[in-house]
Image (cartoon, coloured by chain):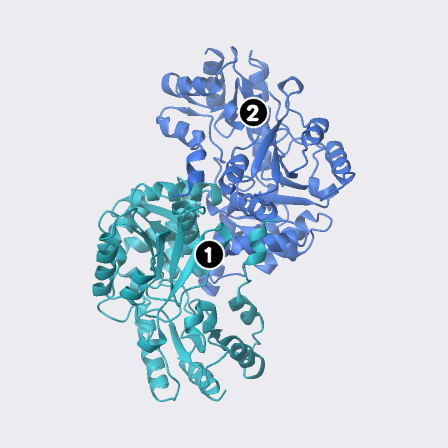
Chain colours: A blue, B cyan
Amino acid sequence: MNPKLATIEPSLIRALAAKKKPESIDLGLGEPTLLPQARFIESATRWAVRSGLKYTPNAGDPATRARIAAHYAYPGLGAAANVCMTTGSQEAVYVAVKALLDPAADEILVVEPAYPAYLKIAQLEGIAARGVALSAASGFRFDVDAIAAAIGPRTRMIVIGSPANPTGRVITRADAQRLAAVLGARSGPPIWVLHDEIYRELTYVEDAGSLAAVYPYTIVANSLSKSNALTGLRVGWALAPSPAIEAIVQIHAWVTSTASTFAQRVAFEIFGEPGALVEQAAWYARQRAGVLEILRAGELEFVEPDGSFYVCVKLARGGDSVAAAHTLVDHHGVVAIPGRIFGSTLEGWLRLSFVAPLDQFAEGVRRIAAL
Amino acid sequence: MNPKLATIEPSLIRALAAKKKPESIDLGLGEPTLLPQARFIESATRWAVRSGLKYTPNAGDPATRARIAAHYAYPGLGAAANVCMTTGSQEAVYVAVKALLDPAADEILVVEPAYPAYLKIAQLEGIAARGVALSAASGFRFDVDAIAAAIGPRTRMIVIGSPANPTGRVITRADAQRLAAVLGARSGPPIWVLHDEIYRELTYVEDAGSLAAVYPYTIVANSLSKSNALTGLRVGWALAPSPAIEAIVQIHAWVTSTASTFAQRVAFEIFGEPGALVEQAAWYARQRAGVLEILRAGELEFVEPDGSFYVCVKLARGGDSVAAAHTLVDHHGVVAIPGRIFGSTLEGWLRLSFVAPLDQFAEGVRRIAAL
């Protein structure tokens, strides 16, 4: 067996979800409860019945990649050649980490609180990884000085999720520019920024920054999972400059060969209809407004989300978030995700998703406050 | 960058395919030319529109996995828990190799001629790998003695493709039993057999063996790509006993998270309709009969395929198959795959697929014979 397996803790999110009972209030969900837009699945089906479902090139269908690159239009990433279609953004992150780092020499810096997969992938690949903690005192805002101070001699990649899972924080345009300036001013080999933008279309502030807009050594990972309620379609992509994108495609070719032609066709349709990518965003904005109203009327400390469909709340007594999450699901019928799994800086907090009906959210928050 | 990348040659198959002109005769194709069965895609679409496309568990949808396990009914592999749904059989092979071997200690033995991905994946993962050559003199038949003799002290996995890409050879039931007996009689840690069965449904002989039927340390990789003309759907699976399957699922969870829910639903439908998996097999049997008639009327030496949609032909003058393939595509309008890429034992041969119309196949063979 691969000895790395024993070093990686199994997913606690899945373990908690398995304890859920039918009557539980589920604030742990990491996926939309909306249905996807049927017309895109149906038109992809008509196309598939007519054309079959053949392999695309390893990097993906050129027309789909061209639409995606043109839509984001990041400087230096505007061509189909800058896109590798993947099996969800998970594979995009996996192949980017695997392609761009040398396990014998390089280190990854993960800005925390963060989605746990970044560190787990680094562990699996035998790549050194460290977290850099955003602080509770500043509401987990991106802190360019803290990130810059954490860079070590071996650091070759910084992973940023913005909008962040779990805090919903976004890096501002000004901070993205400052980070780009700091990184650009360094001597030595460039440091990659892996910007996970999977919640990009669910942003509720005006000044959200994209690293790819300002820093040429950015890899973007994204997908249609959250924006279009298509988690189960498994269509994502990596955007990267040459020659990083060629390395990514080469790894991807041996890992999964190609992304689903059907899923890519759905993406082709969505990126071909103006507005389709953000059609569901208004629903999340309304949910967020309701959630803020509920939380402001209560006693729990919380982080106002700039994006995503998560809100982090602080346990009234602080302490062990994993124990609290187990108590909640076992005795109070609420599924919530313990902050600690996103980094020690979020210990004492819980991540709540707001894809459930608002009355359930309110009842869940009441039970959490009564803990 | 990952230093392993520089050690892996890019895919020569894709390089040759890129040279193809519109008027070329393409005998290089590695995928069906038939259309998939529309009814399964359409019913999965109706289901998706109604139910959405949510994540399945990491291992895949339990009902789909149960149907697949029950269909093959291999001893010890008959439960849903023995199945991990993957992004095509490529990911099944990738995660199996990554999960079950220790790069610091273990070695893979690949029975050649073989699909090149097995060795490339081993290189990418830093796992020692060797080929064991089946001989041209015996028509590339599986040779249990040669395989047994090649096992070294570090060998922990033997990879067998049967029906084989590129030769179309299958391991017989008797030889599968002999190999199982040889492996079972060894002392020390068990050796895994990774049996790639992706061409299983396209078998033209009665005595085809399955390692999983006779050897308890077998991992099976398979997919709907070839049987049901669904290469672009990217739905495959690994079958494995516990605890290997748990290790496979754990790796899979960090690589791609889950297989496509849509693709799994198509598989659920296909495995729910008796005969659907082999509905297209008769077409391939007719193609093979036509191909054998053409080849028997000609001068080229060839390997009569027991399965798959490939036939290997020997270059009249032998020699450099890569140079011959380039000459063929550049000057004679024929795409054919050079034998050398499947292992040195197939140097001097070409792999031809028989998914093109038979008159094109006949004309392609005429041009190859005239080289």
Residue that lies at the very extreme toward the front in this rendered image:
B153
Residue shown at 52%/33% (left/top)? A116
Q: Which of B37 and A188 is in front in this view?
A: A188
Q: What residue type is labelled 1?
A: Thr
User: Which mark is in front, 2 or 1?
Assistant: 2
Residue shown at 68%/44% (left/top)? A218
Q: What residue type is labelled 2?
A: Val
> Is B265 above or below relative to A132?
below
3D distance between C-alphas at marks 2 and 1: 36 Å
Q: Is residue A292 left or right of residue B363?
A: right
Q: What element carries label 1?
A: helix
> Is A150 above or below relative to B167?
above
Give the crowd class for mark 1: few <14, some 14-19, many >=20 residues within 10 Å: many
> Is B250 above or below relative to B173?
above
Q: Residue A45 carries which label?
A: 1
Residue A359: x and y, percent? 48, 21
Residue B234: x and y, percent? 44, 55
Q: Which chain carries label 1?
A: A
Q: Which mark is residue B252?
A: none
Query: Could one spot residue A138 in this view of the protein?
Result: yes
Q: Which mark is residue A311?
A: 2
> Is B352 above or below relative to A64?
below
